Image (tube, coloured by chain):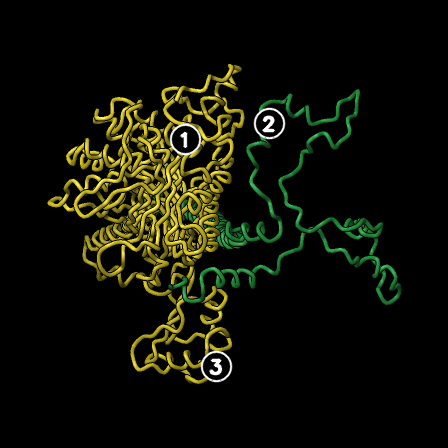
Chain colours: A green, B yellow
Amino acid sequence: MAVMMRQAPDARGWAGEAPAKSAGRRTWASTAWLVAGTIAIAVTSYSLSLKVAAERRDMERLARQNASLETDLKALEAELRVRMRMPQLQRWNDSVLGMVPISATQYLANPVQLAAYGDPIETAAPPATQPRVQLAVRDLAPAAPVVPAAPRALLVSAEAPPRPAPAVRPAPVQAATPAERPAIERPAEAPADLLREVEMNFGTSGGPNR
Amino acid sequence: MSPATAPRVAVRLPGHRQMALGVARQRLAIGILLFIAMTGLLGVRLVELSLFDGPPRRALPVAANPNIRAEIVDRNGVTLASSFEAYALAARPRDIMGNKEALIAALARILPERPEESIRAAIHHDGKFRYITRRILPEQAEAIRRLGEPGLTLEREAERLYPHVGLAAHLVGYTGIDGRGEGGIERAFEARLTDPAKLDQPLALALDVRVQQALESELKAQMDLQKASGAAGVVMDVHTGEVVALASLPAFDSNRPGGLVGMPSHMNRATLGVYELGSTFKGFTIAMAMEAGVLPRMDERFPTTPIAVGRFRISDSHPKGYPLTVPETLIYSSNVATAKMAERMGRQRQESFLRQLGMMDRAPGELLEAGRPLTPPANNWGLSSVLTVGFGHGIAVTPLHLATAYSTLVNGGVYRPATFLKVPEGAERPGRRVFQDRTSRYLNGMLRLAVLDGTGRQADAEGYRVGGKTGTAEKVLEHGRGYDKRRNITTFAGAFPMDNPRYVVIAMVDDPTVGSRMAGSVAGPVFKRVVNRIAPVLGVAPDTSGASEPDLSMFEGLYKPRDVKRDPNAMRRAAAGLPPLEAPPQ
């Protein structure tokens, strides 16, 4: 619209046979302003648009990463669940841990009963007369005779200084591998174990067929 | 005015110049209008895009939904089945561009677990399409995609994983190679599990994996010990009808179901297999007779001398030699006395009660593997059928039928059909009253006595006030009529705690061959061990003091306790600080 309005005096000048120099300059100046303004706006818009596109790309990348992480998470969770599946826990319990359900007599009705299990403060009764509170764990692997070296070997912490090479000092190596078995044997490696158990329980063809 | 323009001006006619000027103006105006229109159009489109077109759409989602099929979880949210994205690799031999042998070598490198011959067979297959393998890892799929061979197709497929391997295999079911459910919940809820709107919401079952594991492992142990051919078990919440555990052994691996569906391991013995469950029915007969009003007094004595009806001869397997009161009938599991009660009740009322208990219809619950009971035919439900059905013979139902009916019996008399889906906390399921509250209370007491003094002694889990009934039935001969005297179906149906029953447990062992074949020593110990394991999990507190024993004052003097100190009446009196009663006069 502005352009048309500006052209009206121009045309009038043309018709009146008096094309004033100042009028031409004004026209050129306004055109220059228009062009400059357009360029400025275009450049600003373009950079803005670039910025938005970049943000969007970043967002998409993040969403992709999220999705892939979610899939990984799901896979890891599934692996965990498979490793701690109920039949496997039962097998470990049957073969290693030997935990039994708590029996009805092990429940205490009130705190007074619980207190009765402790040593009386005044007269320390001999422990044999008191029923012992005990975890419901079957002692499968009998406690090994206590050897001074054994606890140290079992309680190696992260702050322990790095052990010297066995070739330099063979003596500590013998001490560090005590003959006693650990109280709980680690089961065999899980994946092979898993397959074996599945085949043992269900057979390779998908179930015992009588 | 320059000299060059003078001649042109000279040839113009008057008014020509004005005309030219007018045309120029017109053109200019048109150009400007066009320009404005275009700018306006762009502006309008921009406004439309920014305001009305919503967020920018992408051609494809960033990643496929990880839940291709909704998960199945137990009542505590433990996953029983979940889906993974997997790929299937197929060849279109006619579209293969490159050297086939080189392609086979490349594929064999990527898929070391596939024999090269099978890959070669697929690549050289004389047809349009052939699967090379149905399951490959995403890394392998990526490596194959990089080969760039247009004759290879990678198809996205859903892989179903059952983390607990064979646990509750019959209940959860399995999916076939095409990802459709082919058994159990997977089949019954196919539409729900594949509904795109509900893919992210797992389907919560009433099952509790801990209870399921306890039930299955104890049944399996007994089955192995006695070299039985099968076993089944149900744990049910008596107030909601939720099936907390449902076991059928032998089981199969849901991840690799394999084989044919008709195999013995694939039959759901708890919901599809129907068995004559024997004396476990005696409780129903007594309750029905009480409800029908033909058993007004508990101290009425029934003779136990064997009776003959038709070609059958009914006698007791634990004969007592003296007439029995009503509680004693259940405690000592008298066939004769129960048959007499059934005779008094008659066929009409027996059939009507059995129908109300759901024993005439298919097994309750959502599973499609629902067995239809075998009942006497309508035209041959004569006196002998009435008598034998009274003590659980001549009628075959599934263990789930039995569990539902026992729930009705002990929960106050309200029948609620079994459900495998979790019932929300506090939700009340509609039921229909079959027995009066008093009948249910009396039966609870008798079932408790049957465990303390009767055939179910080996089922008595200390402190949990269990009650229940054994059932030993001979198996029907496979070919022909009659029963095999050496092969038994042993069942124990019970509930705990009897002062306010919460759970019904059914344990059934099919055809034990080693050791005792009576239910009391086969299914009874299973029941006891299962209760010992699941009661702490289900939040049932034991009480060894006797204060929580059910109130049996109505049966005072109607039975002889085996151990006077372990009698519920005496234990309640002792816990309340009252002196023991004098021995009842005989």
Q: Of the two numbered discs 1 and 3 on the same chain, state the one appearing first in sequence.
A: 3
Looking at the rendered structure, the secondary structure element under dot 2 is: loop
Query: Circle 1 is placed at which residue position?
Result: B448
Q: CA distance from mark 2 to mark 3?
A: 70 Å
* Amino acid at circle 1: Arg
Q: x%, y% of residue A125? A: 77, 26
Q: Is residue B39 left or right of residue A130?
A: left
In what quadrant of the picture does the N terminus of chain B appear?
bottom left
Q: Residue at x 44, y 30 (%)?
A: B497
Counting from the top left corner in percent of width and height, residue B247 is at 40, 48
Q: Which of the chains bears the disc numbered 3?
A: B
Q: Tell me: residue B394, above or below residue B446.
A: below
The answer to whether residue B440 is above or below residue B459 is: above
Q: Nearer the viewer, residue A175 or B442?
A: B442
Quadrant in the rendering for residue B381: top left
**Residue of label 2:** A108
Q: Nearer the viewer, mark 1 or mark 3?
A: 1
Residue at the left extreme, as displayed: B379
Label 2 or label 1, whichever lies nearer to me, is: 1
Q: Residue at x 78, y 58 (%)?
A: A179
The chain letter under disc 2 is A
**Residue type marked 2:** Leu
Q: Quadrant of residue A105?
A: top right
- Report helix, strand or loop for mark 1: helix
**Of circles 2 and 3, which is in front?**
2
Same chain for marks 2 and 3? no
Q: Chain of mark 1?
A: B
- A104 shown above or below A59: above
Q: Is residue A8 left or right of residue B64?
A: left
Q: Position of residue B363 (x, y in %)?
A: 27, 44
- The residue singled out by tag 3 in the image is B105
